[in-house]
Amino acid sequence: MGPPPASAAPASSAAAPAAAPDVAKSAPPAPAAPASPASVTGPLPPSPESPSPLLRMLLREGQPELVAALGGGGGGGGGGEGEGESEGKPGGGAEGGAGAGAGFFPGFSQLVELQAEVLQRLEGALGVAPAQTKHTDEHGIMRLQSLRPGAAVNLFRSYRVPSPAASGAGASTPAARVTPIRTMTQLFSRYVTPDGVARIYTKTTTSTPDHWPTPQLDVEIGGTEQQLIFYVGLGPKAPISSDLPYLDLYYNRPPPPPPSPASPSSSPSDAAPPAAPPLPSFKAVEAEARAQPGFTPFVSPSLWVRALAAGALCFTVAWDGGRDAAAMERVRRYALAVAEIWLAFVAADAAGAGGGAADADVSTVGAAATTGGDGSVSDGGAASGGGGGGQAAAGGWALAARDGAAGGGGGGDAFVREQWRRGGVSLRNHVRHDPMTPLLYPVFGEDGVTQWIEMVAGDE
C-alpha cells in the first residue's frame, strides 16, 4: 500500500496514510493532552529529544523538496552517516518556525519523529540496521523522484539484522539472539496531486521470514495538512475469516509477556527486576481507538486494501498540521502500541522457532496445544493473555500442530506452514499487488517503479 502518485486522485486508497507532528529544537512542541486513565495502552513515555538520527539523515540525504517540506534549508543528497551535522536541524516546528520557507509542510517532521520512535524500538528489540540491498546504497538509501520535476519525491531506506560476525555482536546483543528479518523498509514522501494539494507520506514495514506465522507490521501515516490517513496494522499470513485460531492468537488475545531475563550471577535473595506492564490485545487497542474523537474509520474503495485492513487500525484523523496536540498524542499512542504488540509476538515466535533460527524444524513445536471444537486454541491452562503454558513457549508455531483443525484445511502442519509462506510472499509484494501501482508508472517511469517494488519486497 504505497502513496498515491502525483497523478492519482487524492485519498483513493489506504495507501495514502497519515502524518504526525513536528518536534524541533527551534520550536518546542505543544504539550500533549493527558491520556485517559482508562486507556488500555497505559502511560506514554516522554517523546525523545528531536531531531532524531532519522530526521537528521533525511535532512542530510533527502531531495531538496523533501528537505524543504521538513523545514530544512538547502539540498540533500550528500554525506555519510556521520556527516553534515549542521544540516540536521529543521527550520521550523509544528507552528512553522522562523526558518520555515517555501515548500514547508507543517507537522511532517513530527511524523518522521514518530517513525523514528518505531525504528528505535525495532533497533532495540531486533538489532536492525541500515543495509545495502539490490537497489539501495551502502547506507541503505534509495532516492526516487517523478519524471516531472517537483511533482513527487521519495526516499527509501532498507534495513536488515546483521549477522553477529558482521556486526561484531556478542551473544548477549539483540542481533545475536533474536529472529531474522526477511525485509524492512522505511519510506518518506512528499508529492502534489493534480488538484494542487501537497501531501506527505511515511511508512515503516517489517516482516519476518515468509514461513514464520508472525503477521507483517505496517505503520503508514500521511495525508494533507488538514487530515491524515492512519493505517497501522498486523498484516495476517493466514485468512482470518476462516483460520479462527490465528485470529484468536494474534488479534483477540494479548501477546505473551517477555521471558524474565536470568542473570547467572544472581542469587535467590536478589530482588527480581520489575515486570514490564502487560500489553493489550490488538482488538482492545482497536476498540479504544474507535472511541476517540476525531478518529473516523476509513473505508478504502479498493477491495484488496479493505481485505488487508481487517488486521489494521485504519482511520482518518483531523490533525491541523501537527498543531492539534490531542490528535497527535493519540496517533503516537496507537502507532507505538501496535508496534509493541508486534514485537512481543515476534519474541514469542522466535522462542518457539528455536531461538530465532529461520530454518528451525518446528514440526514438533507446540505439540502440547490442542484445538477445541470451536477452533480456539487451548494451551493446557495458559491465561487468556497468552502468557505461560505451551502456547506462550511455542508462539504461533502451535497453530501448525493442528491436524485437521478448524482453519487448518485438514492438512495439518505442512498445509498451515505453506499458507503462512504464501501469505508472507504476498504481503512483502504488496506494492506489486496494490491497485494504485499502475498509476505510478507514468509518474516515476517503469525502471523507477520496478526498483520500488523489488526494494520493498526484499528482492536481493
Image: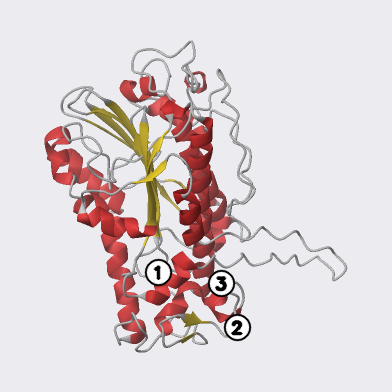
Residue 205 in view: no
Distance (Cα) linking label 1 and label 3:
18 Å
Residue 311 falls in image quadrant: bottom left
Say what amino acid the circle numbered 2 marks: Gly
Distance (Cα) linking label 2 and label 1:
25 Å
Residue 64 falls in image quadrant: top left
Q: Which residue is mark 3?
A: 386
Please report the residue visible at 54 percent of the width from the left and 71 percent of the height from the top: 351
The mark that comes first in sequence, 3 or 2, is 2
Say what amino acid the circle numbered 1 marks: Trp
Front label number (1 vs 3): 3
- The residue closer to the viewer here, 131 or 113, is 113
Q: Secondary structure beneath disc 1? A: loop
Instruction: Check residue 381 in the rendering and tell me which mark sits there, or answer none.
Output: 2
Left or right of 453: which side holds 334?
right
- The residue closer to the viewer here, 359 or 103, is 103
Please report the residue visible at 39 percent of the width from the left and 28 percent of the height from the top: 61
Left or right of 149: which side holds 233?
right
Q: Secondary structure beneath disc 2? A: loop
Q: Which residue is mark 1?
A: 212
Residue 250: % across, % down: 45, 67
Residue 359: % across, % down: 41, 72
Say what amino acid the circle numbered 3 marks: Gly
Residue 282: % across, % down: 48, 59
Q: Is residue 102 above or below residue 257?
A: above
Please report the residue visible at 43 percent of the width from the left and 14 percent of the height from the top: 100
Determine whether label 3 and label 2 are within 8 Å by CB: no
Q: Secondary structure beneath disc 3? A: loop
Determine whether label 1 and label 3 are within 8 Å by CB: no
Left or right of 107: which side holds 451?
left
Q: Is residue 67 above or below residue 156?
A: above
Residue 32: % across, % down: 59, 33
